Image: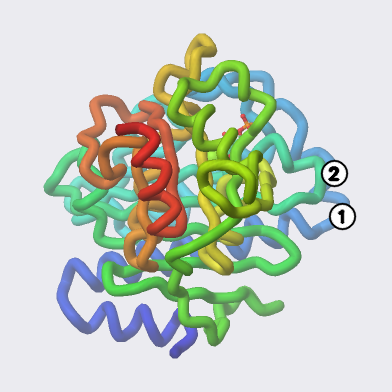
Amino acid sequence: MQDLDAVLKQHAAQSDIDADVARAVNGLARAAAAISKLIRTPDKAANLGAIKGSANADGDDQKALDVLADDEITAQLHTAGVAIYLSEEQDTPIPLHADGTLIVASDPLDGSSNIDTNVSIGTIFSIMPAAGGSLQCGRNQLAAGFFVYGPQTTLLLTLGDGVLAFQMDDDGFFCDMGWQVAMPADTQEFGINTSNQRHWHAPVKAYIDACLDGRDGELKRNYNMRWVGSLVADAWRIFRRGGVFLYPADCRDGYSQGRLRLVYEANPVAMLVEQAGGKATNGTDSILDIQPQDLHERVAFIFGSMNEVDVIIGYHS
Ligand SMILES: O=P(O)(O)OC[C@H]1O[C@](O)(COP(=O)(O)O)[C@@H](O)[C@@H]1O
Ligand SMILES: [Mg+2]
Ligand SMILES: [Mg+2]
């Protein structure tokens, strides 16, 4: 196990494109260090949750920190020589370097509704070859990861061969957490926003009912429930101790494909999940095999401990 700098140096030595991936991850780590510092600085943190006035491409209100995080990442990816930046906060792809070999997609600030609540938020990223164009399926990802700005600032990273966990120190240096990231295959913990229960489709309703019935129900075991409301925080917990996360499609207007975005939320998390031995699906298809049609398209997203995700897929078939 090694610190991020050493891991990236080794990766860079493998090939030209791996060197570019290492530069991009290094730039993202610098951006995350700056975002983390901003959140922790009293006079600067005060207004980070204020609405900036405009809505982003998804129609969500942009908060001050959404915009600052996006600016920070744009600048770092420019320095890293990336070809194109795809962002939740930008309507269209941002061209950076015509001769760059990589496309980076990012949710610059995940968990915007938690900015003012001192609850964990984060940054998610996906790195793809530029040759594949802006709409590539998740299987093409060369690397993916997410930072969490919580009690610790952390990074979960995959370069395509397992998952590594790092914690940032006071100097913005990402240190190995000494943790073998392997998601437990079994779990008795689920995460879903149950306030949407009346809108769910039958398979999700049936699965959650069975969880709530506990030992007396058809799954014959008691379940616990956790829902932070920041994907990065819910995901980190699931990588750490197992669990399943569900943001399903439902009957509300605008939720026929769920809420989360395929290109810069579900795909990178799904790559990490598979690399850690878990499973990620929309209920029927593997997330990483879905061909995106639009930069901001949404997807029903279910992921976590392999055997429990299979139980949920069973309810869909
Ligand atoms: O408020 P809801 O409907 O439970 O949605 C929660 C989900 O929305 C998100 O906040 C969406 O992310 P953004 O903050 O990047 O828009 C996820 O992090 C989280 O899982
Ligand atoms: Mg998000
Ligand atoms: Mg966001």
Q: Residue at x 38, y 31 (%)?
A: 299
**Residue 99 vertical position relative to residue 208 in the rendered view, above or below:** below
Q: Amino acid at mark 2?
A: Ala
Find out if the beta carbon at label 1 lies less than 8 Å from the nearest ligand 1 atom: no
Residue 275, label in figure? none
**Residue 198 vertical position relative to residue 109 in the rendered view, above or below:** above
Residue at the disc numbered 2:
46
304 relative to 191 in the view: left or right: left
User: Residue lying farthest bottom?
Assistant: 1
Q: Residue at x 27, y 44 (%)?
A: 286
Residue neighbourhood size for the residue with mark 2, other residues' Cα within 10 Å, grouped as few (<14), some (14–19), many (≥20): few
Can the viewer see residue 100?
no
Residue neighbourhood size for the residue with mark 1, other residues' Cα within 10 Å, grouped as few (<14), some (14–19), many (≥20): few
Q: Amino acid at mark 1?
A: Pro
Residue at the disc numbered 1:
42
Residue nearest the observer in this picture, 260 or 25: 260
Q: Quadrant of the C terminus?
A: top left
Q: CA distance from mark 2 to mark 1?
A: 6 Å
Residue nearest the observer in this picture, 120 or 311: 311
Q: Residue at x 40, y 57 (%)?
A: 307
> Residue 272 at what x, y percent from top left?
39, 60
Q: Quadrant of the N terminus?
A: bottom left
**Residue 304 vertical position relative to residue 71 in the rendered view, above or below:** below
> Residue 32 at what x, y percent from top left?
57, 60
Q: Residue at x 66, y 79 (%)?
A: 169
User: Residue lying farthest front?
Assistant: 216
Ligand 1 shows up in which quadrant of the image?
top right
Instruction: Assign a secondary structure to mark 1.
Output: helix
